[in-house]
């Protein structure tokens, strides 16, 4: 798995609960994918081990290099209201 320096030095330490297996799972089978205005790609997936919460994984434009990964509480709340896929 390729990672940016930002992910290695900051994001992975800020969100130590996020497991690499979860990141791989979301990238392999996202429930939603969206290209950001800056070209980076956001992927979302629900993680049963995290009480079904939504994990957001952001990659560089190549769709492979991990830039950030975190539990997205806002996406999860929108899912609960039926505004996002689950």
Image (tube, grey):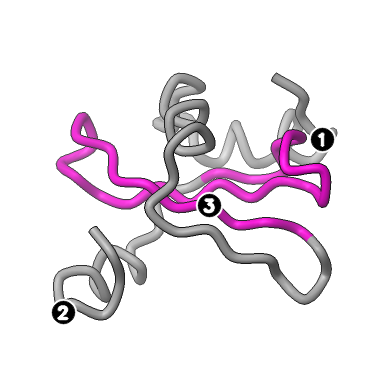
User: Cα distance, mark 3 to mark 1?
Assistant: 16 Å
Q: Position of residue 51 (x, y in %)?
A: 15, 41
Instruction: Tell me the quadrant of the picture where the N terminus can be found.
Output: top right
The residue at which mark 1 appears reads as: 4
Mark 2 — residue?
Answer: 81
- Vertical relation: 79 (above or below) 70: below
At x 25%, y 49%, the residue is 53
Question: Would residue 51 appear left or right of 16 to someone viewing this image?
Answer: left
Q: Mark 2 and mark 3: span between their CA atoms?
A: 19 Å
Residues under numbered marks 3 and 1 in contact, where contact means CB atoms less than 8 Å apart:
no
* Circle 1 crowding by C-alpha within 10 Å: few under 14, some 14–19, many from 20: some
Horizontally, residue 81 falls left or right of residue 53, namely left
Could you tell which of marks 3 and 1 lies nearer the N-terminus? 1
Residue 30 has which mark?
A: none
Where residue 39 appears, as percent x and y from the top left, is: 81, 64
Residue placed under numbered mark 3 in the picture: 43
The residue sitting at 33% across, 52% down in the picture is 54
Identify the element where label 1 is drawn.
loop
Q: Position of residue 14 (x, y in %)?
A: 56, 41
Q: Which residues are magenta?
A: 40-69
Most foreground residue, 68 or 79: 79
Badge 3 element: strand
- The answer to which of marks 2 and 3 sits earlier in the sequence is 3
Q: Residue at x 55, y 46 (%)?
A: 57
Q: CA distance from mark 2 to mark 1?
A: 34 Å
Above-or-below relation of 12 to 55:
above
Q: Name the residue nearer the viewer: 25 or 12.
A: 25
């Amino acid at each position: 798995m390729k990672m940016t320096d930002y992910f290695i030095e900051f994001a992975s330490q800020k969100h130590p609960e996020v497991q690499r297996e979860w990141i791989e799972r979301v990238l392999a089978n996202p429930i939603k994918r969206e290209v950001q205005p800056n070209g980076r790609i956001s992927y979302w997936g629900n993680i049963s081990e995290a009480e079904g919460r939504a994990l957001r994984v952001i990659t560089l434009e190549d769709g492979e290099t991990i830039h950030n990964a975190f539990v997205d509480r806002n996406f999860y709340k929108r899912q609960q209201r039926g505004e996002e896929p689950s």
